[in-house]
Each structure stands twice: as structure tokens, then as C-alpha cells.
Image (spheres, coloured by chain):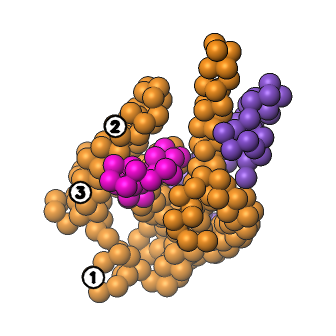
Chain colours: A purple, B orange
């Protein structure tokens, strides 16, 4: 596959799209971990939800 | 499970936990197929190999508008029906929409330099998409600046609906004004003007990016629900301490 004289423009586009999508995925995954960690801390402190369920029960 | 059942955040979390692994796998498979088809697509007789940039530019450009459309429906849900998940949906979608808009602008710019001889031109299409990007950033800043979630939700919903005026301007800018940006070649009266060799990879990539949005959006909504649960429990903890 030859990308011709504008290969750098094409490759930069695909690399940039990959990087942005990976950053989005990582940000969402890290945020999920952070929220679960905070819920675990609250559960350890004896805080329960109004329904009586544990804070860490995310269902 | 009916749509009304999904108004309950707990039921929504249960459904999301079941759906996310399947959606993520399907998105990955479609992205791989789309990338393979983009790689083997022939060169365009005018654009040469730079036509490959279109396979990521166009899906991102479509999604930049679609996400704002989703946020506008969510804004109606917040203001009219006070749906408990409406603001969660809008807030979770904004950073994803901003990312797609950023990619549409930058990949368009990278295509424009070899094809138009310039990275940027203040024509109606490019300028209206830049305004869309700035509105995404403004909304994200608004949600972060207002501490009370219900006040932030109402203000963001109004701003989102006002911003929706920009969507038809973006779509029809190439028809209403004399722009450097070419007119629509897929979503147009009389059907797509693209050859199948370009249309198929483009549609596969569009479907893959749409599924990517759905997957990321559901995951980000789950995070936002948990963040609000954390906030509620922290307030409960604070009131127990002060009592």
C-alpha cells in the first residue's frame, strides 16, 4: 500500500484519531475506578444508601 | 424492560453492566474491519491516497452533530420531563462530542493542506463547526463551574438547546453560502454520489464510530451516576457528623 506524497498527512490523521480515542477510553476507565474507590471508602466508613444497600453495590 | 424502567438509575446500571462488554467487542471488530477496508480502498482520481483521511474525518464530523442532537434531546428531557437520567446523559456525552468535533476539525485541516493548499479557511462550514467545538467546551466548563447539579443541569440544558440552532447551519452551510468545503456527497437528494469503493469503507467506519460513541456514552453515564451517588453519600456522611 503506497500512500503517495501526502503520507505524513494521512498517517498523522490516523495516529491522532487513535490517540484521542485511547485517551477517551483511558479517562472513562480511570474515572470508573476512582468512583468505585470512593464508594468503597464510604462503605468502609459505615455509610449506606437510603435503600439500605451497601455503597459499593453498584447494581 | 421498558424505557420507563430505565429512568431508574439502578436499573440503568444493571443493563449497562450487561451491554457494555458486547458493545465494546462489536465496536472493536467493526473498527478493525473499517480500518482494513480503508487501507485497501483505491486512490481517488483527484485526491489520490488522501481520500483515506475522509474515512475518519466524515464519521467524526457526522458524530460531532449527532452527539449535540442527542444532548439536545436530553436537554428537553431535563427541562420538560425532568427525567432523572437526562442531565446525566447530556453531561456524559459532552466530552465525547467535543473529542469527535476536535478530530473532525484537525483531520479536515490535515486533508485541506494538500488538497486546498491551506490548513484553514474561514468559510461557513469550517467556522460553524469551530463554533460547535467552542460550545462543547463552554458546556463542559459550565457543568464544572456550577456546584449545584440541578442548577447546572437547567443552565446547561438551555445552553444546549440554544446551541442546537447551529446544527442546521452546519448542515446547510455548504448550500446556503459559497464555501470552499464541498457539498454533501452521501446524505443528499438523489442518493450518495460516491463510488461503492469509497462508500462502503466510509459507512463501515461511520457505524464503528457510532457504536464507539454508544459504548463510551453508556460507560461515561455509568460513571456520572456513581459520581452523583458518591456526592449524595458524602453529604449524608457530613450531616451524620454534624448531628
Q: Residue at x 24, y 53 (%)?
A: B165
Residues drawn in magenta: B68-93
Q: Tell me whether marks 2 and 1 sit on the same chain.
A: yes
Q: Residue at x 51, y 47 (%)?
A: B88
The quadrant of the rendering that contains the C terminus of chain B is top right
Label 2 marks a residue whose chain is B
Q: Confirm or deny contact between disc 3 and disc 2 (CB under 8 A).
A: no
Mark 3 crowdedness (10 Å alpha carbons): few <14, some 14-19, many ≥20: some
> For this view, does B242 lie left or right of residue A43?
left
Closer to the eye: label 3 or 2: 2
Earlier sequence position, callout 3 versus callout 2: 2
Earlier sequence position, callout 2 versus callout 1: 2
Mark 2, residue position: B155
Q: Tell me whether marks 3 and 1 sit on the same chain.
A: yes
> For this view, does B118 lie left or right of residue A51?
left
Closer to the eye: label 2 or 1: 2
Mark 3, residue position: B169
| Mark 3 vs mark 1, CA separation in Å | 18 Å
Q: Secondary structure at mark 3?
A: helix
Number of callouts:
3
| Residue B16, horizontal then vertical, whole percent | 67, 59
Residue B189 painted magenta: no
The quadrant of the rendering that contains the N terminus of chain B is bottom right
Mark 1, residue position: B189
> For this view, does A1 lie left or right of residue B177?
right
Amino acid at each position: 500500500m503506497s500512500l503517495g506524497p501526502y503520507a505524513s498527512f494521512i498517517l498523522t490523521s490516523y495516529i491522532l484519531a487513535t490517540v484521542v480515542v485511547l485517551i477517551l477510553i483511558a479517562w472513562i476507565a480511570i474515572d470508573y475506578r476512582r468512583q468505585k474507590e470512593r464508594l468503597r471508602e464510604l462503605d468502609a466508613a459505615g455509610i449506606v444508601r437510603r435503600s439500605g444497600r451497601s455503597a459499593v453495590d453498584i447494581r | 424492560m421498558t424505557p420507563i424502567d430505565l429512568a431508574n438509575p439502578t436499573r440503568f446500571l444493571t443493563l449497562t453492566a450487561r451491554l457494555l462488554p458486547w458493545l465494546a467487542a462489536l465496536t472493536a471488530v467493526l473498527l478493525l474491519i473499517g480500518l482494513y477496508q480503508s487501507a485497501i480502498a483505491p486512490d481517488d482520481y483527484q485526491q489520490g491516497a488522501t481520500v483515506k483521511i475522509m474515512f475518519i474525518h466524515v464519521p467524526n464530523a457526522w458524530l460531532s452533530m449527532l452527539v449535540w442532537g442527542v444532548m439536545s434531546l436530553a436537554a428537553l428531557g431535563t427541562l420538560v420531563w425532568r427525567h432523572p437520567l437526562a442531565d446525566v446523559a447530556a453531561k456524559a456525552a459532552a466530552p465525547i462530542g467535543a473529542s469527535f468535533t476536535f478530530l473532525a476539525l484537525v483531520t479536515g485541516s490535515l486533508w485541506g493542506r494538500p488538497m486546498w493548499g491551506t490548513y484553514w479557511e474561514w468559510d461557513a462550514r469550517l467556522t460553524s463547526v469551530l463554533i460547535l467545538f467552542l460550545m462543547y467546551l463552554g458546556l463542559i466548563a459550565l457543568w464544572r463551574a456550577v456546584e449545584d447539579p440541578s442548577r447546572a443541569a437547567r443552565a446547561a440544558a438551555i445552553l444546549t438547546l440554544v446551541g442546537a440552532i447551529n446544527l442546521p447551519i452546519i448542515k446547510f452551510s455548504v448550500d446556503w453560502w459559497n464555501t470552499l468545503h464541498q457539498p454533501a456527497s452521501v446524505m443528499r437528494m438523489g442518493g450518495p454520489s460516491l463510488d461503492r469503493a469509497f462508500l462502503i469503507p466510509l459507512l463501515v467506519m461511520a457505524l464503528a464510530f457510532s457504536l464507539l460513541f454508544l459504548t463510551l456514552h453508556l460507560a461515561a453515564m455509568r460513571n456520572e451516576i456513581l459520581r452523583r451517588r458518591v456526592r449524595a453519600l458524602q453529604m449524608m456522611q457530613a450531616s451524620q457528623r454534624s448531628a
